[in-house]
Structures are given as structure tokens and as C-alpha cells.
Amino acid sequence: MGLIEIEGMEFYAYHGHFKQEQVVGNKFLLNISIETNCSTAGKTDNLHDALDYQKVYNLIKEEMEVKSYLLEHICKRILDRLYSEFDTIQKATVKVSKINPPMGGQIKRVSITMSR
């Protein structure tokens, strides 16, 4: 078993409950970890035998371009897509953070983490 982690992905997107968030947008950070069997790829050194994390990134980028009101919805959509596209995933954890959320105070970020 292996753990693939893609950390610190940055996106500018238009997610949020408030109309202004969906018009002005905000910066989001995303981390993902995926448990999968890496033994074959470790032996063959062939991308065909590995979980292609470039494809994972592109999938996440596509989902971040779809507006959502809630971070929970973004996480669920990403997990749904991952499991539909990659049959070798044993477990995946997604963390989405909104930078400087408009909550009426000085807040660095708010995050949601979901696993399946």
C-alpha cells in the first residue's frame, strides 16, 4: 500500500454562500491524500501501472471551476469523481480551505476535511 499526497494546490474560485463570494471569488487551498496499491508501479517504473496524479490534479481543477455554496459540497464532488475515475483507490481524504472567509472577523482560513 502507498500514500499519494498532493499538497498546497491553490485555486481562485467562486464558491460561497453569499452572492458577493460568487461574484468576487476567493482563494482556496486544497490538499489530498490517496491510499492505493503502489507495488506494481514500484516494480515496473511505468506510469500505466500507477495512479496518475496529474490526472488527479486535473480532475480537482475541473471540480474547483464548478460553483458551490458549501465546502462540503466541493469535497463530496471531488471524492465522487475520484472514485468513479480510479478503481485502485482504497481511501481518499480531501481538505478544502477558504482563505480569509467573510465571517466578520480576522480569520486566516476555514477548512473542511472529508474522507471515504
Image (cartoon, rainbow, N blue to C red):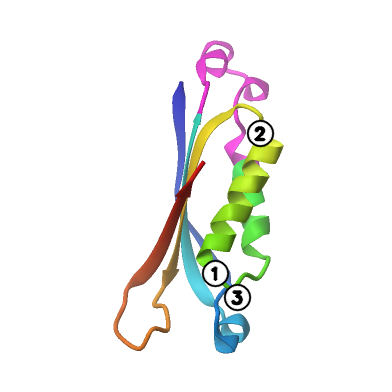
- Mark 3, residue position: 14
- Mark 1, residue position: 70
The answer for how far apart the CA atoms under marks 1 and 3 are is 11 Å
Type of the residue with mark 2: Phe
Could you say whether the residue bearing mark 1 is in a helix, strand or loop? loop
The answer for how far apart the CA atoms under marks 1 and 2 are is 25 Å
Q: Which badge, 1 or 2, is on the more N-terminal residue?
A: 1
Type of the residue with mark 1: Leu
Q: Which residues are magenta?
A: 36-55
Above or below — where is 86 with respect to 107? above
- Viewer can see residue 8: no
**Between residues 33 and 45, which one lies in front from this camera angle?**
33
Q: Which badge, 1 or 3, is on the more N-terminal residue?
A: 3
Residue found at x 42% / y 78%: 101
Q: Position of residue 74 (x, y in %)?
A: 58, 60
- Closest to the camera, between mark 1 and mark 2, is 1
Above or below — where is 80 with respect to 15? above
Would you say the magenta stretch is mainly helix, strand or loop? helix
Could you say whether the residue bearing mark 3 is in a helix, strand or loop? loop
- Mark 2, residue position: 86
Type of the residue with mark 3: Tyr
Residue found at x 61% / y 43%: 56
Q: How many marks?
A: 3
Question: How many other residues sit within 10 Å of disc 3, few (<14), some (14-19) or many (≥20)?
Answer: many
Q: Which badge, 2 or 3, is on the more N-terminal residue?
A: 3
The residue sitting at the left extreme is: 106
